[in-house]
Image: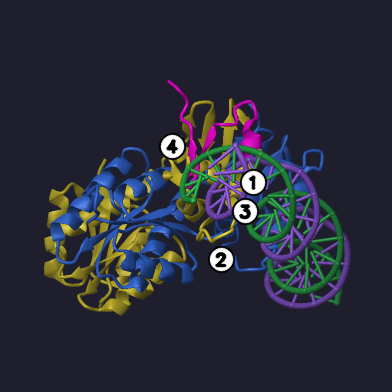
Chain colours: A yellow, B blue, C purple, D green
Amino acid sequence: MQNRVLLVEDDEELRQLLARYLTTQGFSVREAANGRDGLSLALGQDCDIVVLDIMLPDINGLDVLRELRGKTHLPVILLTARGDETDRIVGLEVGADDYIPKPCNPRELVARLQAILRRVAWDQQADVDASRVYGDLRVEPDQRRIYQNDTPLELTATEYEVLQVLLAHAGSVVRKTDLMQWALGRRLEAYDRTLDMHVSNLRKKLGNDDPTRIETVRGLGYSYRVPTE
Amino acid sequence: MQNRVLLVEDDEELRQLLARYLTTQGFSVREAANGRDGLSLALGQDCDIVVLDIMLPDINGLDVLRELRGKTHLPVILLTARGDETDRIVGLEVGADDYIPKPCNPRELVARLQAILRRVAWDQQADVDASRVYGDLRVEPDQRRIYQNDTPLELTATEYEVLQVLLAHAGSVVRKTDLMQWALGRRLEAYDRTLDMHVSNLRKKLGNDDPTRIETVRGLGYSYRVPTE
DNA sequence: AGGCTTGTGTAAAGGTTCGGTAAAGGAAAA
DNA sequence: TTTTCCTTTACCGAACCTTTACACAAGCCT
């Protein structure tokens, strides 16, 4: 499975150098020496990723990128002059996936190409089942639900966050300040009983048959009792 | 309604600086001061992207990354010491999406975060060309129509897009920001009720016999209820 | 033991935010 | 122009987070 790179770079020497190196690394390479050609090749649909110089004889690389983004989400890495921070950040903001300062280390270029292609491949892959199981509880982040013996618990947004954090640390104590920060996203202030209330409500919803699933550690916080196995 | 960043960085000062900046830029930020906490938060907490320092007091950042990659494809940006080229390339090869040399320009960090999140969002939305069936609904992208029991629904262009996106993620929660981006092609601004209206109209057209086909997930977004099997 | 302090459980009230939707306004297509 | 559709506005009700209040339990001191 060979990845196809389109190299848009006007400097003949650099282009050939990179093309040769990419080929040895298992890429199949198309080349363009100016923005116009680059654009039409990129739109021609038969490459996986574009390496695009910003300084081109005809159209500015950033404009090529803008044009491209109007029509496709093809991954693009920009080649920028070293030190030109503005170009880089603007490039990212316009929709580039990454940039590399010139003159670039070919090994780094390859590493970045791979990183982006890997990301694309992962993302397009069907959802990996990211669910996590703790005894009779199952967390389904995609659905934002927690199931108890395959029945969904009717949790509010905050309750979901709190329980989910406790489960992620099942068996160890989560301090109140951390729980607050991680689940509610703010600092725990004095006399704030919000967390206690959420825990209280959670205990109710988890069933009073077993009130110690969420254990209180006085002066510290809470701990989800890991099921005995 | 914002993107959630997990910041794993032991230097208290830098972490708070970045956290504050990211917050002003509209991210919601979770923090961890060491590798162990970072790892369990990344696995448990559902965040959208991780910013991971390589130099950590307990576990090396690269090991955290390796551990993480065994279980998830969560996007990761590494914070590396400036000049340490090896760490960076190894980082990318181990599975990082990007790296930033320390001390970093916060604006650049944001640009890179956005670039990766944009890529993920695009890719996850990339499967829309074949006809698909969901229970009694059938999407025909070529005709831009959706059939309910072989009768075409009379949808407007936007309604088609909204329903199509929800169906493409049937069973999972689609956040409002994403739905906006994918179906309407723009960012969700405060007080914008456009989406709610389209969903409301869709529910009517889908038949009020079953008002929960499109489920509201308060504070997050909507989810098309996958037919029970 | 008794009293004191501190921390926790929880019911109920308070108040805010959020989503549903009718209707009006505005933009674009026909 | 007329029609269709998208967006905004406005109001309402519901969901739910937070606060308050009181009761109880645990630890500590004398």
Nearer the viewer's eye, disc 3 or disc 4? 4
Tag 2: residue type? Answer: Arg
Q: Between marks 3 and 4, how big is the CA–CA gap?
A: 25 Å
Instruction: Give the residue displayed 62% in from the left and 36% down from the top.
Output: A203
Q: Name the image quarter holding the C terminus of chain B.
A: top right
How many numbered callouts? 4
Instruction: Give the residue displayed 36% in from the left and 73% down from the top.
Output: B107
Tag 4: residue type? Answer: Val
Labels 2 and 3: the sequence-earlier one = 3
Q: Name the image quarter holding the N terminus of chain B.
A: bottom right
Q: Between marks 3 and 1, how big is the CA–CA gap?
A: 29 Å
Tell me if label 2 and label 3 are in contact, CB under 8 Å: no
Tell me, yes or no, if residue B131 can be seen here: no
Give the chain letter at badge 4.
A
Q: Residues within 10 Å of mark 1 (few under 14, many from 20)?
A: some
Give the chain letter at badge 1.
A
Q: Between marks 1 and 4, how big is the CA–CA gap?
A: 25 Å
Q: Are marks 4 and 2 on the same chain?
A: no
The residue labelled by disc 1 is: A156
Label annotation for residue B161: 3
The residue labelled by disc 2 is: B187
Tell me if label 3 and label 1 are in contact, CB under 8 Å: no
The residue labelled by disc 4 is: A128
Place of residue B179 in the rendered image (x, y in percent of width and height, measured from the top left): 58, 55
* B147, D29: nearer the viewer: D29
Look at the image and give the residue range highlighted in magenta: A202-229
Place of residue A180 in the rendered image (x, y in percent of width and height, measured from the top left): 51, 53
Give the chain letter at badge 2.
B
* C18, B208: nearer the viewer: C18
